[in-house]
């Protein structure tokens, strides 16, 4: 097994030089060109003084330059610090300062935020602008060989979303990322050089990086990119490029399902669909599979687990609503507040150990110790496990609503509301209540042309769940707030004043 993530590209380029590695509409980059670009980026960075272990920021959308820069940094022995392209100047400065990154490769369209952040942090900004960047790269010296790295060395620092406090950087090693992408690619998705993977997931995010880019490049497949996800464009590319592997978060599947163009879309090339990032509503999964005549395999993981921890394996029974069973080389179990195992069928926190678990949080020993108790990574996700060993996510620990002393798990209520014929999307949250501590509330997006009142939605849920669980407070919206991967951001949902009691 390679000890450096950079070797995935080196080995594939040697075997499949002329095969397409990356596509962006009419632009096609083969493995030889990708490899040469990474070689030059490595040379450029070494010329600028990069030493093994130095951190380098990347703030690029889903364009071929991302992979060129990513593997170039690794080839030079550096550590990649991928950054959300939507960050503002002060946030860019935080990521660069916290990681100690000395350079930042940023898309020319983000110049203001990237420039401000780099200047504040004392980092050098390297602008990535088509045409000019090629001149810079091809004028740089070649780094003929991959800088030797130990498998336990840090390869990437992935910052968590920072829902509580400031973001923390998860240190993922070369071994973490090599094993996670190869185990996922070979035992779950069966990636080969004949596959075309839709690159709609942001490459700065762990899911897109491991299951999309690294898995494709490790096995000589082609990654066809979408800089910004649009459901109509995604369906167009699936037909145009004969996409065989579709990877997305639930809101992407929901969006493709609800466009009028789906009736004429050619998705016959799809071999496997993969969902992760957040729990997929069972009704959305069933509707997508029926509409596009395919099967979705749902998996689970976090930035701290490289990210894949469990999956519905293609050679075993698939259970809708389940995140499956642990992947090869990984263990998962459920524990209570005292870290004691919980009985089968009862709710507990998912804890994980195996080759996928991060080295720790970058320069945050206290935070690392808090989540790595007793040798297990504590995920903060609550789940149950059935007699066959399949895990079922109930909710995030912090999203749980405590109403009058009773635990209410929002996902359970959301699953019920998705069954309502007028409901397109829904998010259930807890809102403060003087008498009960918290009350159950729901923000609902209706399907185009559909009608339903607050009373209709409330009555629908009341008929299907215990009296303490159904949402008393309901309001409608045209859309739910979402992050860059399409994940619904509950922390940004605020109940309107004067909502019904």
Image (cartoon, helix red, strand yellow):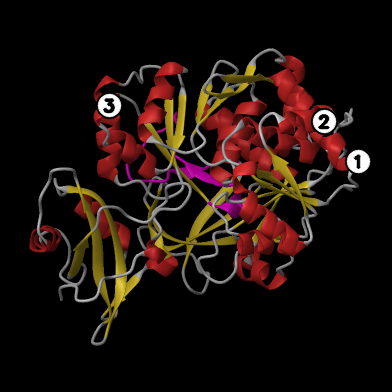
For label 2, the residue is 40
Disc 2, disc 3: CB below 8 Å? no
Q: Residues within 10 Å of mark 1 (few under 14, many from 20)?
A: few
Which quadrant of the figure has residue 70? top right
Q: Residue at x 81, y 46 (%)?
A: 78
The kind of secondary structure element at disc 3 is helix
Which image quarter holds the N terminus? top right
Q: Residue at x 38, y 49 (%)?
A: 279
Cα distance, mark 3 to mark 1?
50 Å
* Above or below 432: residue 283: above
Between 284 and 165, the one lying in front of the other is: 165
In the rendered structure, find residue 261 and report the number of the disc placed on it.
3
Residue 158 visible in the snapshot: no
Residue 16 percent location from the top left of the image: 70, 15
Residue 13 visible in the snapshot: yes
In the rendered structure, find residue 276 and report the number of the disc placed on it.
none
Magenta-span inclusion, residue 401: no
For label 1, the residue is 47
The kind of secondary structure element at disc 2 is helix
Residue 432 percent location from the top left of the image: 30, 79
Q: Which secondary structure dominates the residues rendered in magenta? A: loop
């Amino acid at each position: 097994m390679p000890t450096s993530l950079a070797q995935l590209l080196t080995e594939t380029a040697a075997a499949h030089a002329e095969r397409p590695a990356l596509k962006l509409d009419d632009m096609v980059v083969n493995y030889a060109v990708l490899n040469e670009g990474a070689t030059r980026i490595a040379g450029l960075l070494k010329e600028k003084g990069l030493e093994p272990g130095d951190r380098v920021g990347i703030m690029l959308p889903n364009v071929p330059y991302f992979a060129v820069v990513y593997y170039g940094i690794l080839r030079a022995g550096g550590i990649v610090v991928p950054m959300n392209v939507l960050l503002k100047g002060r946030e860019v400065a935080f990521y660069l300062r916290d990681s100690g990154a000395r350079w930042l490769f940023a898309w020319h369209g983000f110049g203001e935020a990237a420039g401000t952040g780099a200047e504040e942090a004392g980092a050098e900004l390297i602008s990535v602008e088509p045409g000019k960047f090629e001149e810079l790269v091809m004028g740089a010296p070649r780094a003929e060989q991959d800088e030797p790295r130990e498998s336990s060395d840090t390869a990437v620092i992935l910052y968590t979303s920072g829902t509580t406090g400031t973001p923390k950087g998860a240190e993922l090693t070369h071994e973490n990322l090599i094993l996670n992408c190869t185990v996922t690619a070979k035992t779950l998705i069966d990636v080969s050089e004949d596959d075309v993977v839709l690159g709609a997931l942001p490459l700065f995010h762990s899911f897109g990086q491991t299951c999309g880019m690294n898995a494709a490049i490790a096995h000589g497949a082609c990654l066809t990119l979408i800089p910004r996800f649009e459901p109509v464009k995604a369906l167009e590319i699936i037909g145009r490029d004969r996409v065989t592997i579709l990877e997305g978060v639930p809101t992407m599947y929901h969006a493709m399902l609800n466009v009028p163009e789906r009736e004429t879309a050619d998705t016959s090339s799809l071999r496997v669909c993969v969902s992760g990032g957040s729990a997929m509503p069972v009704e959305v999964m069933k509707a997508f599979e029926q509409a596009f005549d395919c099967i979705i395999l749902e998996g689970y993981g976090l930035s701290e687990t490289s990210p894949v921890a469990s999956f519905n394996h293609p050679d075993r029974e698939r259970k809708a609503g389940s995140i499956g069973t642990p992947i090869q080389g990984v263990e998962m179990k459920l524990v209570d507040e005292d870290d004691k195992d919980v009985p089968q069928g009862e709710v507990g926190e998912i804890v994980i150990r195996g080759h996928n678990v991060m080295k720790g949080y970058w320069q945050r020993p206290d935070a690392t110790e808090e989540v790595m108790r007793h040798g297990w990574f504590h995920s903060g996700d609550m789940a149950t496990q059935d007699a066959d060993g399949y895990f079922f996510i109930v909710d995030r620990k912090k999203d749980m609503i405590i109403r009058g002393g009773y635990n209410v798990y929002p996902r359970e209520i959301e699953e019920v509301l998705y069954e309502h014929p007028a409901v397109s999307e829904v998010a259930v949250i807890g809102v403060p209540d003087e008498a009960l501590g918290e009350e159950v509330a729901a923000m609902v997006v209706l399907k185009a042309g559909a009608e339903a009142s607050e009373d209709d939605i409330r009555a629908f849920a009341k008929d299907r769940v215990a009296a303490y669980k159904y949402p008393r407070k309901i309001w409608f919206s045209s859309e739910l707030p979402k992050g860059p991967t399409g994940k619904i951001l509950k922390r940004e949902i605020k109940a309107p004043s004067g909502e019904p009691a």
